[in-house]
Amino acid sequence: MKLFTGNKNPPFALDVTLEGSRLSYSVRAIMQREFVGNPNSTHSNGGKYFDEKLITEWRGDFGVFGEPIYKRSIDLQTLRQHPEFADHASFMLYAPVGLMERYNTPEGFYTQTPNLYVATLASKMDAQAYHASVLQTHPLGHILIPFKSSPIEEWSLGFNVFNPALIKASPSLDVVPAITLAMVREEVLPVVRFVGESTADALPGDEVFINFRLETPQGEPITDRDSDVYLEATAGYLVGRRIKTVGGQGSTIFRPDGMTSGEISKIKVGFKYFSGTDDLVVNVL
């Protein structure tokens, strides 16, 4: 399984293991190398050096010390019973470390694993705005699930750390440095796109046949997974608004009912909790 690292957090050491479906992670304190040395000596910036004898290991220029200050273990299989389990899902992980230390958050909050896209469906807020203005929190990481039918091996993890060197991962995890976890979500999770042109013309009373398919964010068709696809239109009538794909593809019919010449309808397609991954504009002639 891939483990992507974002860099939006102060420094701390993170140990992550995946044994079967059991995900465990723990956080330990660190000290930067320049401040480690003889505790009886004074640093040039003032204050005594941190005792080098307390360092148990080095990760890059960071010395790790002490017992874990936070740890959690999750059986990933239990997420399949989560009420928010869905295609194109991002289950968020929180911990009272890093940027979260500045918030007065109840302890029970850290045992929750909510689906980001359920929480932001109505507001359409991006993750950063949602966490800053609504939750007033900062996520430690996320668990990305492309499809409900995807095996755990196709899921991926993401953690916000200061430096990828601060992560120690088990051999079952492939650590991939990234810029932000928001970019990882955009580059990893599937989308639904219309097949053909982005616009279509129709006369009043016509029927427009609409085809769509599952794709990777890079535009490659996905044929070995299926999903319930959701469509909505700003005007007119969609014969089917919830379509189950077959072999990654699906179709429906649009009728410009109640529309007159010169009017347009924007049709959106997406997933249950992540709508609008593509648009199709129908012009009434």
Image (cartoon, rainbow, N blue to C red):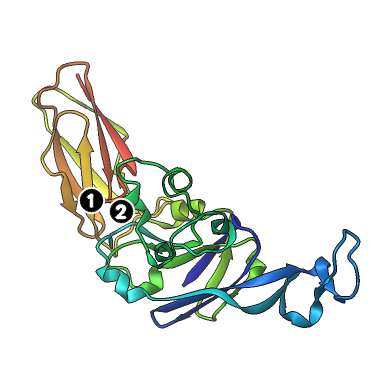
Q: Are marks 2 and 1 in contact (CB under 8 Å)?
A: yes
Percent coordinates x, y for residue 196 in the rendering: 30, 40
Q: Is residue 285 above or below residue 15?
A: above
Residue 38 image offset from top left, x and y in percent: 87, 76
State left or right for residue 31 relative to residue 230.
right
- Residue drawn at x 44%, y 66% is 156
Depth check, front residue: 157 or 95: 95
Residue 254 place in picture, x, y as percent: 15, 35
* 157 is higher (above) or lower (below) than 189: below
Residue 191 at least partly seen: no
Check disc 2 and give the amino acid type.
Answer: Leu
Q: Please give the residue where the numbered disc 2 appears in the rendered image.
A: 214
- Quadrant containing the C terminus is top left
Camera sees residue 7: yes
Mark positioned earlier in the residue sequence (2 or 1): 2
Q: Which residue is nearer to you in this view: 174 or 74?
A: 74
Dot 2, crowdedness within 10 Å: few (<14), some or many (≥20)? many
| Callout 1 secondary element | strand
Mark 2 or 1, closer to the camera: 1
Q: Residue at x 30, y 74 (%)?
A: 78
Q: Quadrant of residue 220?
A: bottom left
User: From the viewer's perspective, is residue 54 above or below residue 8?
Assistant: below
Image position of 239 (left or right of 4): left
Residue drawn at point x = 81 percent, y = 67 percent: 35
The image quadrant that residue 87 belongs to is bottom left
Q: CA distance from mark 2 to mark 1?
A: 9 Å
- Name the spot of residue 50 as percent of width and height, x first: 80, 72
- Judged left or right of residue 10, residue 252 is left
- Secondary structure found at label 2: strand
Residue topped by disc 1: 229
Three-letter amino acid code at the position of disc 1:
Val
